[in-house]
Amino acid sequence: MLRLKITLLTLTALITGGGALYLYARLGNAVAAPALLGALIAVTCVLRLLTLRR
């Protein structure tokens, strides 16, 4: 179950981060900032789960 959560959060971070970079390139900083924040939160959750696993 923990491995599934880590996988889903990693995919979420990758998709959100990629979307944020695309939005930043197309529309500017104001639109991409919330998406980058979402990607950062997802990455933080993945790192937290990985440290709890040990």
Image (cartoon, grey):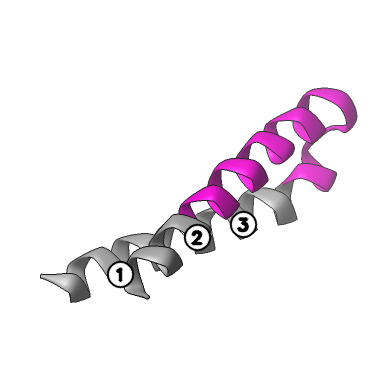
* For discs 3 and 1, the disc positioned in front in the rendered view: 1
Answer yes or no: do the residues labelled 3 and 1 have beta carbons within 8 Å? no
User: In the rendered image, which residue does mark 2 sit on?
Assistant: 9
Give the mark nearest the N terminus, 3 or 2: 2
Mark 1 vs mark 2: give the one in front.
Answer: 2
Name the kind of residue labelled 3 in the image: Leu
Q: Is residue 22 above or below residue 40?
A: above
Q: Residue furthest right?
A: 27
Which residue lies under the disc numbered 3?
37
Amino acid of disc 1 = Arg
Figure check: 25 above or below 36: above
| Picture quarter with the N terminus | bottom left
Q: CA distance from mark 3 to mark 1?
A: 16 Å
Q: Which of the pair 48/4 is nearer the observer?
A: 4
Looking at the picture, how far across and down is residue 5, in whole percent? 44, 68
Q: Residues within 10 Å of mark 2 (few under 14, many from 20)?
A: many
Under tag 3, what secondary structure? Answer: helix
Write the residue at 61% across / 57% down.
37
What SS does tag 1 mark?
helix
Q: Identify whether 29 is placed above or below 39.
A: above
Q: CA distance from mark 3 to mark 2?
A: 14 Å
Q: Nearer the viewer, residue 33 or 51?
A: 51
Q: What's the magenta region? A: 10-32
